Every structure is written in C-alpha cells, then in structure tokens.
Amino acid sequence: MKIFEELADEVQKGNSESVEELTKRALSQGISAEDILNNGLVAGMNIVSKKFKNNEIFIPEVLISAKSMYSGLGIIKPLLSELNVKSKGKVVIGTVKGDLHDIGKNIVAMLLQGAGFDVVDLGADVPKEKFLEFVKNEGADILAMSALLTTTMIYMKETIETLKNAGLRENVKVIIGGAPVTESYAAQIDADGYAPDAASAVDLTKRLLGET
Amino acid sequence: MESGNIPVLSVNEDTIPRAYEKAIREVWEKGASIRTEYDHPGDPPSRDATVIIIVRNPFGQPRFHRSFADGLGGLAEYVMEVVHGAHDYWVKPLEEILKGTKSKDTRWTYTYHGRLFEYRIEDKVVNQIGAMIDKLSKTGYTRRAQAITWNPKLDPPTEDPPCLQRVWGRLCDDGEGGYIYNMNTHWRSRDLFKAWFENVIALTTLMRKIAESISQRTKKRVKLGRYVDISDSLHIYGSYFREIEGDAEKGIKSFFETLESRSFEERTWNSDFIKPHFINDGVGKGLRPMLEREKDMPEKVRKAIAEELLLMEEEDYLV
C-alpha cells in the first residue's frame, strides 16, 4: 500500500510531523495499528538499520529517524495494547552500575524497538538489583547490558550471578556490549552473546529468540 | 615518520564542518603511525600529528557535521556540561581522585567546566574564565587572559587526564568602535574522529559566551573572530581503520566514501535545523529531558540551563 511506503520513507527522512500525520491518516482509513506498526514504522526503521549497518548514514541521523518512529508509535501504542498485539520479544536494557555512558546503549535500544521488540530502557548506572527486578517483573526475554569502562564491566558478571542466585538465569538470555567487552569476556562470565556494535546487537537478539 | 619527527599540519577553513573534514583527510594522509595507550592488541598504530586548525567563522553555516558519535540531544547536553557545568556533580571527591588508579569510585576525575570555572589550588577556588572576562574588559589587548585545566598534583596519576589544556583570548578593534574576540584552545591529545567536532561546538559556544560577557561589561559590540585549535597529538585511532561490518563508528574508510557519495549539504546541518533537537531530541536527550532526568543537578546549574532554553526559543539565536 502506498501509505506504508510513504510512512517508511518519512521515518527514514526523520520527518516526525509527516509520520504523525500519515499515522493518523492510515488509522482514519481503517488500517489496523498492527499493520501501521509492522508495514510502516518498523519497515522504515529496518531500512535505517540496514543503511547504518552499511555505513551509509551517521549516528545522529539514526536517532532522528528513531524520533520520527516514536511520534507514530505514540499514536498507535494505546490501540496496540487494546488489541493485545504481541511484540517480537521483551528486552530489558541498561548501562551497568557506576557507568554513565549511554550513547551505544541508546542506539541499541532504538534499533531493537525499530525492529519490533518491546524495550524497557533502565538508563545508565543501573545496579544489579534493578536489573533483577525488571527481568523478573517484566518477564524479559533478553537482558542487554552495556559498559564503557574496564572498571565497570565487572558488574555484568555480578548481575549474571545475581540472576543465577535468584533462579532466573534460565528464564532470560543475557547479551553484553561496550568498548572494553569482548566475545571471550562474554563466554567467561556466562553471557549468552556479545555484540560489537548496535546493528549486530539486533541480529544477535533475533538469533537468540529464534527469529532468524 | 622515518625521521622520528612528528608531522606538523595546518588546516585553515571558513566553517567547522569544512575544517573537520579537511583535518581528517590531512591527518589520515600525512600523519605519523604511532602507538597510543588506548590501542587494543592487534590494532594498527594510530595516525597522529601536531595540528593547528583555524576556523575563520566559527558560527558560519552550516555549523554542524552529521558525523559524530552521539545524537543531537546528547551534543546539546555536552555543550551544557562544558559551558554551564551540567555534570560537575559527577566528579568524585578529592580523596578518591588522589587514590589515582587505585580508586574504585567510577565517577569522573574532572570536567572542563570545573577546571575552567572552579579551579582548585591550595585552599582557593579560582574562576579563570571570569578572570579572563575581567582582564579583557579592562585591557582588551592584554596577552594574559587565559585559563588552564591541568592540575599537576591530580592529573598525572589518573588514567584519563584532561585533553584540553588551555584557553587563551584577546580582543582587537573592529575599526567601527567595537571589538573582535579571538580565541585559541590548546589540547594535549585528542581523538579527531570521535571527539574533535563535539569539543569544538562546545568551545566555540563558550567563546561566544565570553564575547557576550565582555560586550555587557564594556557596553561595546563584540563580534567573534577566528577560532584556533592547537593539538599536540591529534589522532585517528588504529581501531577505526578497520572496516568492521555493521559499525559506522569504526569505519574511517566509510567516512571517505561518504565524502564522495553525499554532497556537502547532505553531510551537514544548519543551526536552524539543530535547534529543536537541542531542546528535545525526542529520544530522551536534549535540554528539557536533561532537566527532567538529572534530579541531582545543583539548582544554580539548573537555572542556567533553563535560561539557555529561553534563549533557544528566540528565533535568531544560533546554537
């Protein structure tokens, strides 16, 4: 449908006002919120994600597209809840305790949301107890942790230990990322996966949840 | 660098984005291959040079390049950090800083604003930028208006000492009864690809604030002159050379490809476009979200940022 193409195009351009207007128009034409989400907003962000992965666009441009996607999502979200539309999975994400760096984490959160996942972003400087609480209460499928400092990456291990002690480790897949983090560190602390960059984090999430 | 001499390069451009692109090209093509403390095992050596960059018109348009490692709201918050001290409260206590690398406290050891506006020496706190404004307002041609960041007691033992070392300014007559404010900044070491652009947006905003304060004090018009940026080591880290699939941040090659595939207008933004994103980028960053999110920010700083918000709502105010 033409309106889906227009929506996806405006998301790519980062034009929030047009996305809002097109979302309203689509609803007035009787198109379901779920179709608007998947065929318009998510479709647009998937193209943005692909372009970012291919180094065709810059980081601030990804965030501007995400803003426009959110402006459409804000309109249809209440309808999605009413219809009980299931997301592709729930991700709890945050930067670990003692670490205030959040740029990488924010981009991962946006690309995951753009790929159709339900994302609960706990922000930066998140203590292990808070990760545990949200994994438990939100029924998270994925816990994604980020750290930019060698002094804070140790809290990833502590959080995984906390999940084990609470008997929740088997319920959730844990992925990690950030400048000092490596594949071998992920294996060492018993994480389920490591992503070297934001686009790979989306691929990893899809893979762990059996989507690809 | 067969001779053992670090190359000394110079860039002279009208606007910040032009200077940024030229500097990346110059350092890439003419810089020496040298290792740094931040290289990972297996990384090629960084490309490095001593570089002087002249931006003739720091608020010339387009002022913003699109290639930097943050969003526009994040950039706005960084400008507030440097100019108004938004994150001075993230600095750890002195006793923890003195522990150097043994400190387990992961908070910061300094901010530029803290060092420039509240430099601690013996039992005194010195507002160096305030002193610069005083000195320049009294004697515009003085050569003594400067502010330093380096603390020889606190900085050598830490893993991450300040990159910015010194801010220096001087006034010249504009020939029409007003002044032109010239400013130089001196940097010890700097990541050209991921830090230079954001640093310069913040420092040129500080430049304008200094000029405005001098204008208020002297009751004369103070226009902005050239901004000069001098780095002892301006580098592109070896880790950025690799074309890592899926990581736009780490591909220096892709940056050069972008210079070919997109026009200059498609690689930059004007201040007008930026302004609403600085106020609220819609994805959790910007001045408004910052004030809502950072509840522990001191009231004085909160007020300064709120005033900045009011300025941004004025049509002709350039960010």
Image (tube, helix red, strand yellow):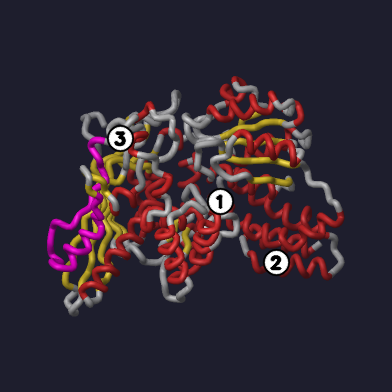
Q: Residue at x 57, y 22 (%)?
A: A184
State the residue position of label 1: A57
Q: Residue furthest bottom?
A: B176
Spatial separation of the CA atoms under disc 1 and disc 2: 23 Å
As displayed, is residue A196 above or below residue B20?
Answer: above
Q: Residue at x 62, y 61 (%)?
A: A13
| Residue type at the position of mark 2 | Glu
Q: Secondary structure at mark 3?
A: strand
Tell me the quarter of the picture where residue B212 sits.
bottom left
State the residue position of label 2: A20
Q: Secondary structure at mark 2?
A: helix
Q: Residue at x 70, y 55 (%)?
A: A44
Specify the quadrant that holds the N terminus of chain B: top left
- The answer to which of B22 and A154 lies nearer the viewer is A154
Q: Are marks 3 and 2 on the same chain?
A: no
| Residue type at the position of mark 1 | Ile
| Residue type at the position of mark 3 | Ala
In this view, the mark in front (3 or 2) = 2
Q: Are marks 1 and 3 on the same chain?
A: no
In the rendered image, residue B236, in percent from the top left (x then y), is placed at: 38, 39
Q: Which residues are magenta?
A: B125-153
As displayed, is residue B37 above or below residue B61?
Answer: above
In the rendered image, residue A57, in percent from the top left (x then y), is placed at: 56, 51
Q: Are marks 3 and 2 in contact (CB under 8 Å)?
A: no
- The residue carrying pointer 1 sits among few (fewer than 14), some (14 to 19) or many (20 or more) residues within 10 Å by Cα, namely many
Q: Secondary structure at mark 1?
A: loop
Q: Is residue B171 magenta?
A: no
Residue B308 visible from this viewpoint: yes
Spatial separation of the CA atoms under disc 1 and disc 3: 29 Å
As displayed, is residue A17 above or below residue B47?
Answer: below
- The chain ID associated with circle 1 is A
